[in-house]
Image: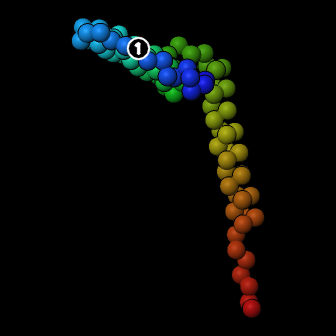
């Protein structure tokens, strides 16, 4: 976006025009706020868990979580062994 695009100046002839424009901007801001809240909720909140999930999906989710935890533990152990300080007798 160029600087020239931002310099569009709208002139107002009365206070009523300013009030109308202010209301329009407030409405747009409120709509944008609602839209951002909906996007945020859809991105960072899990949908409500349903109790009728198939057992195979539950087992699959449990295995995925377990493998992730095991992988993180293994990585932490390898990093610990790689970077631990060795005692030197100098």
Q: Is residue 83 left or right of residue 9?
A: right
Q: Position of residue 68 (x, y in %)?
A: 67, 40
Give the quarter of the image for residue 53: top right
Q: Which residue is drawn at the image coordinates 24% and 12% (left, top)?
A: 15
Image colouring: rainbow
Position of the N terminus by quadrant: top right
Q: Position of residue 86 (x, y in %)?
A: 73, 77
Q: Is residue 34 visible?
A: no
Question: Looking at this rendering, what residue extends furthest in the bottom direction?
Answer: 90
Q: Is residue 20 left or right of residue 40?
A: left
- The answer to which of 54 and 29 lies nearer the viewer is 29
Q: Which residue is drawn at the image coordinates 64% and 43% (left, top)?
A: 69
Q: Which residue is drawn at the image coordinates 37% and 13% (left, top)?
A: 11
Q: Is residue 5 above or below residue 15?
A: below
Q: Position of residue 52 (x, y in %)?
A: 53, 13
Q: Is residue 39 above or below residue 27?
A: below
Position of the C terminus by quadrant: bottom right
Mark 1 — residue?
Answer: 10
- The answer to which of 45 and 52 lies nearer the viewer is 45
Q: Is residue 89 visible?
A: yes
Q: Which residue is drawn at the image coordinates 72% and 59% (left, top)?
A: 79
Q: Is residue 77 above or below residue 23?
A: below
Q: Position of residue 61 (x, y in %)?
A: 63, 28
User: Label 1's element?
Assistant: loop
């Amino acid at each position: 976006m160029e600087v020239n695009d931002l310099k569009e100046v709208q002139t107002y002839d009365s206070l009523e025009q300013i009030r109308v424009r202010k209301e329009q901007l407030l409405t747009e801001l409120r709509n944008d706020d609602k839209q951002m809240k909906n996007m945020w909720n859809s991105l960072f909140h899990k949908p409500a868990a349903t109790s009728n999930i198939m057992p195979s999906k539950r087992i699959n989710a449990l295995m995925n979580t377990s493998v992730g935890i095991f992988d993180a533990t293994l990585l932490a152990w390898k990093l610990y062994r790689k970077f631990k300080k060795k005692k030197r007798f100098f």
